[in-house]
Amino acid sequence: VQLQAYGGGTVQAGGSLNVSCAPCGGHFENYATGWFRQAPGNEREFVGARSWGVGTSYYVKSVQDRFSLSRDTAKNTWYLRMSSLKPEDTAIYFCAAVRDDSKWYRALRSGAVNAWGQGAQVTVSS
């Protein structure tokens, strides 16, 4: 499966943005979702992930209670919904798909994913 990311943009601090991710062919039913981000000069950072089969979610502490992962099965699209954005959230955001099995989270965190999206820019101004 190949992934296409949409959305992002520029917003003032305290605002909200969404980034979406959709497959270019194929369906999401058998995949868990991961989101990562990379700010200029920094390494790629884990943001959040969710297993749709088990219903388990994980978020990095810095985005807990501000970011959430959701999906629209009718549109075959995943969403990263971001609120109360801060300038330090500025980065390129990447989605990732990994087989939704018992080892999904370990695989995701190790980078052993099935597909990456190309990234969407999110800029938060102060």
Image (cartoon, helix red, strand yellow):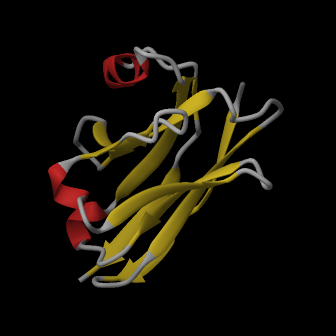
Could one spot residue 13 in this view of the protein?
yes
Residue displayed at 29% across by 48% down: 40
**Which x, y percent locates residue 25?**
83, 32
Could one spot residue 35 in this view of the protein?
no
Residue displayed at 47% across by 35% down: 51
Q: Nearer the viewer, residue 100 or 66?
A: 100
**Which x, y percent locates residue 49?**
40, 40
**Which x, y percent locates residue 109?**
32, 24
Residue displayed at 53% across by 54% down: 120
**Which x, y percent locates residue 47?**
32, 46
Residue displayed at 36% across by 75% down: 83
The C terminus is located in which quarter?
Answer: bottom left
In the drawing, does residue 64 fall left or right of residue 23? Answer: left
| 19 to 9, vertically: above or below | above
Extreme-left residue of the structure: 61
Q: Nearer the viewer, residue 53 or 125?
A: 53
In the drawing, does residue 65 fall left or right of residue 50? Answer: left
The N terminus is located in which quarter?
Answer: top right
| 89 to 11, vertically: above or below | above
| 59 to 125, vertically: above or below | above
Extreme-front residue of the structure: 54
